[in-house]
Image (cartoon, rainbow, N blue to C red):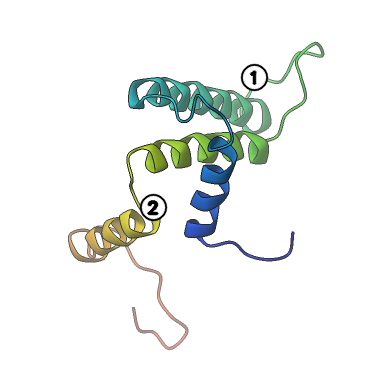
Amino acid sequence: MDEKKTMQDLQQDVDAYISQFKEGYFTPMELTVRLTEELGELAREISHVYGPKKKKSSEEEKTVEEEMGDLLFVLICMANSLDIDLAQAHDRVMEKFNTRDKNRWTRKEQADGQV
């Protein structure tokens, strides 16, 4: 698992998995509900690990990494079902942040004093 995958690789992996089932992808509405559910599970895990609410001994052992993976899987399912290239979506949002929001945050100074 040392090989780094591209976003296209991830989208193809998920599509290959989903394509083996007659049911295929869930509807956008169902995927939105699943995204919300997975985000809630991630939030709960974050609360257990970094917040004051620790797990009960009866609760299943999960990790932040596992919950992020679940959330990513559902997001990729939604992108695939809507024919969205997530790498392109990422590029568009980074362009927005690098233009519209370029002076929004305080930049760290570089070693030579330049920002």
Q: Which of label 1 and label 2 is nearer to you?
A: 2
Q: Which comes sooner in the sequence, label 1 or label 2? A: 1
SS class, disc 1: loop
Viewer-closest of 87 and 55: 87
Q: Quadrant of the C terminus?
A: bottom left
Residue drawn at the location 61% of the way across and 33% of the way down: 67
In this view, the residue in front, 46 or 23, is: 23
Q: Nearer the viewer, residue 80 or 47?
A: 80
Amino acid on which disc 2 is placed: Leu
Q: Which residue is mark 2?
A: 86
- Residue type marked 1: Lys
Q: Is residue 112 left or right of residue 22?
A: left
What x and y, as percent, mark residue 112? 43, 88
Q: Which mark is residue 53?
A: 1
Question: At which x and y percent is residue 55?
Answer: 73, 18
Among the 4 quarters of the image, the one containing residue 56: top right
